[in-house]
Image (cartoon, helix red, strand yellow):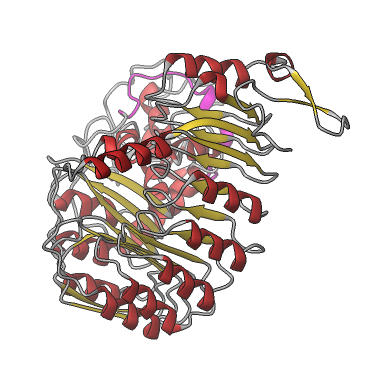
């Protein structure tokens, strides 16, 4: 019996199997002998060792009774451990006993791994480096990395638990149950973004509500082949249950029918694809930004006037409003102006062809602190632009007037001259030849001559802009633009797509910070002229001749075609 407690000489060789047991560093484990399989208590193993040990001593007993409880990683660093034939496999389920874990065992196991992974992970990589690597992997790669070894699996589990933002693409072959099991790993998830390529219904909302109790921001986007079957009542219950939800964005909301959103925490709401809503109730006192996109179908019978009236009453803190619908009219604008939203800073009414200069006057009289105004697709004219310039010269920074056929180059030039803080302007499809696409039936010689004169006026238009703060200018689809002169030192983005009638010799760009120019659908000569003026340093100084002003005070550079039109 004394033989069992005899300690080997320090120079005695240790068996490889014993070394593998030492390297595992288990605080608890099997109570059977590692060689013969008999119980260790009162047991002397008679199986000979394969190593060079001269003393017939049970190494397992030595490990249990006499080895210092200090973690073995401190005695023998993992990087310097000799190789053995009995090392644990990376992720093996063959030798793991399936049992229900006891609470005490789980607590000890977590403590063991935290102490074990404090300096060096199981694969020899520092734990801090492993954490930084795994936390940057996408979800699919993180799931694969968890299969490498036990240390990586534990680190991946901690990454899942600490994740605050998750972006997933759900292909058509993935079931909702898999998404739910993945979300359960992220108990601390705050922001969730799903790109769904299959049909989605209320089951997905139930998985999100159950798995993400701390969710604050949710975004669901759908592909062209997927269908969003979530109804308005189901979304209303989800929003009411999620008291931490502050941002909600969802696409493909064609099956809502009606909805009642009641939330004291919701501040941002984006819904697109809406169609034929019979009832819309917004009870969100802290809502600051709302974006509602309706379908362009003719059978849409949504009453936007009632909706906007209720929106102004129940959401007094609104700052940004965006509504896109072909049913927008002057009555909708008047309903919004009656709400007197004092904090309104951004207003966007898109595709409302029945919105006229009367709506501009109502907006100007009620909201004089707007920083963004988007009336794209409306029927406002240059007179409406004049009212905008008179009211917002000190606040307006972004003006979007695309698809407004009644606006001419004179109105655009006046806006840039009267709005000194303007940084973005979109005038796409304003200066265009509408008669080339929409032919009007003949009504006599007089109407034909008037049509020819109008077409000539729409085609041959010149645009001259000089602005000190303008950064982005969009003139896409301006097929009636004949000449363009820009003197904008801060301009960095210019869109000239489909400007087919713009002559290369009538183009002058004095924009030293210009970085991006979009010119698809333009002539090759025009593209060459743009490249020569944008991507060459001394082109502006040598391309055009000098011309002395009338008072002979200074010399300026102008293209030959603009001659008498340029005034600096």
Q: Main secondary structure of the magenta part?
A: loop
State the residue in front, 180 or 24: 180
- Residue at x 39%, y 73% (from the top left corner): 266
User: What residue range appears in magenta?
Assistant: 68-89
User: What x and y, as percent, mark residue 98?
Assistant: 18, 48
510 versus 331 height, above or below: above
Q: Is residue 440 left or right of residue 15?
A: left
- In percent of width and height, residue 451 lies at 30, 41
Residue drawn at (51%, 28%) of the image: 517
- Quadrant of the image containing the N terminus: top left
Q: Which image quarter is the C terminus in?
A: top right
Residue drawn where x is 19% and y is 71% of the image? 302
Query: Which residue in the rendered view is the most extreme toward the right?
Result: 553
The quarter holding residue 306 reads bottom left
Q: Answer whether residue 315 is visible to the viewer in this image.
A: yes
Closer to the camera, 129 or 192?
192
């Amino acid at each position: 019996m004394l033989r069992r407690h005899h300690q080997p000489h320090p120079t005695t060789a240790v068996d490889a199997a014993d070394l593998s047991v030492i390297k595992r560093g288990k605080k608890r484990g099997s109570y059977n002998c590692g060689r013969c399989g008999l119980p260790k208590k009162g047991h002397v193993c008679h199986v000979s060792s394969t190593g060079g040990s001269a003393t017939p001593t049970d190494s397992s007993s030595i490990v249990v009774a006499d080895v210092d409880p200090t973690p073995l990683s401190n005695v023998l660093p993992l990087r310097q451990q000799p190789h053995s034939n009995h090392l644990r496999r990376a992720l093996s389920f063959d030798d793991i006993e399936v049992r229900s874990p006891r609470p005490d065992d789980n607590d000890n196991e977590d403590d063991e791994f935290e102490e074990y992974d404090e300096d060096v992970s199981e694969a020899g990589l520092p734990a801090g480096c492993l954490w930084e690597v795994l936390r940057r992997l996408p979800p699919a790669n993180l799931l694969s990395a968890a299969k490498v070894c036990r240390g990586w699996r534990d680190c991946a589990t901690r990454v899942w638990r600490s994740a605050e933002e998750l972006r997933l693409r759900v292909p058509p072959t993935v079931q909702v149950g898999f998404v739910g099991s993945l979300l359960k790993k992220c108990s601390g998830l705050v922001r969730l973004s799903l790109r769904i390529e299959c049909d989605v219904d209320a089951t997905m909302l139930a998985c999100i509500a159950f798995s993400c109790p701390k969710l604050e921001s949710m975004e669901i986007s759908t592909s062209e082949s997927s269908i969003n079957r979530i109804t308005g009542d189901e979304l209303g219950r989800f929003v009411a249950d999620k008291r931490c939800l502050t941002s909600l964005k969802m696409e493909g909301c064609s099956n809502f029918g009606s909805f009642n959103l009641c939330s004291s925490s919701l501040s941002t709401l984006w819904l697109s694809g809406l169609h034929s809503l019979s009832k819309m109730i917004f009870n969100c006192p802290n809502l600051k930004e709302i974006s509602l996109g309706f379908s362009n179908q003719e059978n849409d019978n949504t009453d936007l006037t009632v909706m906007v009236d209720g929106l102004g009453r129940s959401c007094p803190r609104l700052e940004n409003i965006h509504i896109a619908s072909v049913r927008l009219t002057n009555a909708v604008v008047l309903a919004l102006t009656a709400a007197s939203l004092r904090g309104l800073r951004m207003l966007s009414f898109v595709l409302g062809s029945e919105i006229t200069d009367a709506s501009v006057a109502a907006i100007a009289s009620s909201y004089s602190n707007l920083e963004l105004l988007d009336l794209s697709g409306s029927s406002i004219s240059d007179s409406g632009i004049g009212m905008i310039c008179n009211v917002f010269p000190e606040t307006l920074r972004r003006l979007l007037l695309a698809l407004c056929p009644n606006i001419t180059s004179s109105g655009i030039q006046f806006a840039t001259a009267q709005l000194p803080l303007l940084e973005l302007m979109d005038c796409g499809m304003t200066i265009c030849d509408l008669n080339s696409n929409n032919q009007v039936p003949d009504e006599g010689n007089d109407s034909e001559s008037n049509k020819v004169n109008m077409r000539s006026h729409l085609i041959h238009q010149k645009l001259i802009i000089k602005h000190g703060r303008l950064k982005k200018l969009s003139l896409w689809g301006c097929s009636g633009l004949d000449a363009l002169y820009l003197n904008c030192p801060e301009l960095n983005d210019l869109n000239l797509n489909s400007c087919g009638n713009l002559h290369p010799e009538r183009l002058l760009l004095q924009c030293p910070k210009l970085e991006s120019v979009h010119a698809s659908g333009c002539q090759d000569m025009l593209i060459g002229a743009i490249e020569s003026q944008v991507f060459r340093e001394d082109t502006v100084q040598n391309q055009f001749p000098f011309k002395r002003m009338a008072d002979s005070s200074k010399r300026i550079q102008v293209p030959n075609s603009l001659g008498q039109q340029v005034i600096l």
